[in-house]
């Protein structure tokens, strides 16, 4: 699969306070995938994204974009990139439509604004002042802004944070559609449900170092327990048993329970991404909110 970005031995130190934010990290991002960058506050996630979108330039290491050095690209690079920052920044005294028309003028090409507004449920509010928008409406408008230039790559930071389930679903569905159309997404979030639903691969960063890179499924298998918990009804009571997953099809007690009892629940011992986050980074997931 073609690589959009290839990062080798990337390090970055902020000059003002001499804090080394990234320490010799390497990874790649493939075309058409949703790649998650996860970690606690101060881990290096934002620094990594800022470097990849050329906001920070004095880094050590190598970064290639589509097989060429990232620093060799001029402003044309930004025609390929859409960015949705965590905290939306809009002109509060302009309408939603006027905001998008202003930002659209920064690009040579752009998508249909009304179509994007309709997809996120803001078309009827396009002529309202953004200062009157709710936080959720501003977040949805932020996603429209990221999609304005019909980008090849989306950088999203907490894309669904603060949205109700219905509107969060809409944004996630649009991300899926973008991916299925060949787009690439680099996602940073503390919402593990979003990670599990959207990401093909994830990188856990802690202390400026990548601790793990893998798929959500592989991580859950690796960090989980190979057991099966069964809850079933016996003599009017709920009973539970735990079985080793190895050769479970040959375990007669397990088979008898399945055959002779009303099964209420069956769960494998896979762990949650929240638990993996804590194990890998040593941090509580909610501290990164």
Image (cartoon, helix red, strand yellow):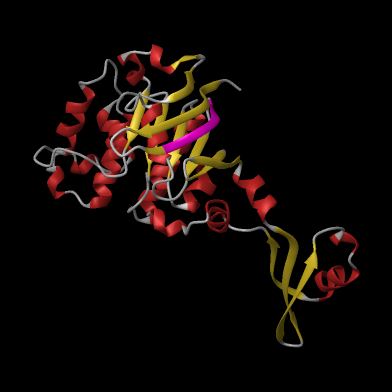
Is 228 located above or below residue 154 in the figure?
below
In front here: 237 or 284? 284
Name which residue lies at 72% across and 87% down. Answer: 236
Residue 138: image location, x then y, percent:
24, 45
> Is 248 positioned to the left or the right of 289 in the image?
right
Residue 18: image location, x then y, percent:
35, 37
> Is 215 positioned to the left or the right of 21 in the image?
right
Q: Quadrant of residue 238?
A: bottom right
In front here: 70 or 112? 70
Name which residue lies at 26% across and 40% down. Answer: 141
* Residue positioned most to the front: 18
Name which residue lies at 63% across and 58% down. Answer: 271
Q: Quadrant of the N terminus?
A: top right
Residue 259: image location, x then y, percent:
84, 71
Q: What span is in magenta? A: 21-30
Is residue 119 within the magenta segment?
A: no
Is 100 located above or below residue 239 in the figure?
above
């Amino acid at each position: 699969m073609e690589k959009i970005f290839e990062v080798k031995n990337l390090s970055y130190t902020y000059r003002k306070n001499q804090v080394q934010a990234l320490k010799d990290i390497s990874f790649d991002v493939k075309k058409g995938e949703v790649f998650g960058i996860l970690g606690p506050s101060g881990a290096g996630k934002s620094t990594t994204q800022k470097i990849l979108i050329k906001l920070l330039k004095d880094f050590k290491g190598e970064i290639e974009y589509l097989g060429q050095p990232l620093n060799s690209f001029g402003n044309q690079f930004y025609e390929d990139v859409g960015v949705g920052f965590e905290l939306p920044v809009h002109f509060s005294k302009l309408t939603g439509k006027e905001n998008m028309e202003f930002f659209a003028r920064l690009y040579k090409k752009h998508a249909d604004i009304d179509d994007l507004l309709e997809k996120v449920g803001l078309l009827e509010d396009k002529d309202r002042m953004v200062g009157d928008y709710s936080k959720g409406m501003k977040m949805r408008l932020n996603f429209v802004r990221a999609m304005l230039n019909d980008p090849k790559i989306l950088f999203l930071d907490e894309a669904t944070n603060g949205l109700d389930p219905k509107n969060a679903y809409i944004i996630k569905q649009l991300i899926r559609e973008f991916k299925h159309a060949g787009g690439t997404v680099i996602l940073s979030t503390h919402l593990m449900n979003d990670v599990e639903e959207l990401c093909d691969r994830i990188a856990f960063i802690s202390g400026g170092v990548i601790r793990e890179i893998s798929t959500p499924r592989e991580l859950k298998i690796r960090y989980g327990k190979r057991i099966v918990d069964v809850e079933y009804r016996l003599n009017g009571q709920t009973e539970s048993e735990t079985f080793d997953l190895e050769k479970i099809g040959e375990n007669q007690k397990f088979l008898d329970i399945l055959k002779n009892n009303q099964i209420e629940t069956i769960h494998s011992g896979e762990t949650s991404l929240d638990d993996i986050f804590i194990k890998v980074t040593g941090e509580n997931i909610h501290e990164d909110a």
